[in-house]
Image: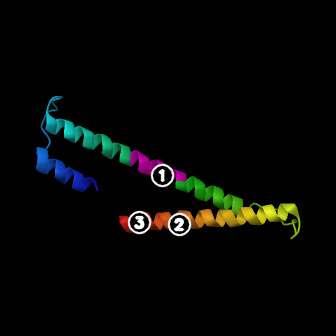
Amino acid sequence: MSDLVAKAITEVFGERCPDFEPECHCCKAWAEFDRITTLEAELEKAREAAFEEAAKVAEAARFEHDDSNQPGDDDWWSTEIANGQAAQIATAIRALSQDKEARE
């Protein structure tokens, strides 16, 4: 996506100026491009960190259970529900990761 935006800026305003001039429209366009590109990179890092943390939490929740719980016990149902939710979260995270890899 960034390549398309950079190409469009180049076509409309031209290549980057050698020195930044605050009143130059070309400089302003490239400065905004840089700002958005930086934000995009920061957002991607935060997203990846959140997915990694969610995956850890999901896996931990899935395997943290008390083997003494039996069907019919309230704790057993809670554990089964937590395991099911953890599995769904882990599946969703894997699907999002695969989707991201496919886009790249």
Can you see residue 92?
Answer: yes
Count neighbours of disc 2 (C-alpha within 10 A) and say few if under 14, some if 14 to 19, many if 20 or more. Answer: some
Q: Residue furthest top?
A: 22
**Residue annotated with mark 3:** 101
The mark that comes first in sequence, 2 or 3, is 2
**Residue annotated with mark 1:** 47
The mark that comes first in sequence, 1 or 3, is 1
From the image, give the main secondary structure of the stretch colored magenta.
helix
Q: Position of residue 101 (x, y in %)?
A: 41, 66
* Range covered by the magenta-colored residues: 41-50
Specify the label residue 94 is tagged with.
2
- In this rendering, the answer to whether 66 lies above or below 50 is below
Image quarter of residue 15: top left
Q: CA distance from mark 2 to mark 1?
A: 13 Å
- In this rendering, the answer to whether 39 lies above or below 57 is above
Q: Nearer the viewer, residue 92 or 101?
A: 92
The mark that comes first in sequence, 2 or 1, is 1
**Tag 2: residue type?**
Arg
Count neighbours of disc 1 (C-alpha within 10 A) and say few if under 14, some if 14 to 19, many if 20 or more. Answer: few
Image quarter of residue 86: bottom right
Q: Is residue 31 left or right of residue 13?
A: right
Residue 42 painted magenta: yes
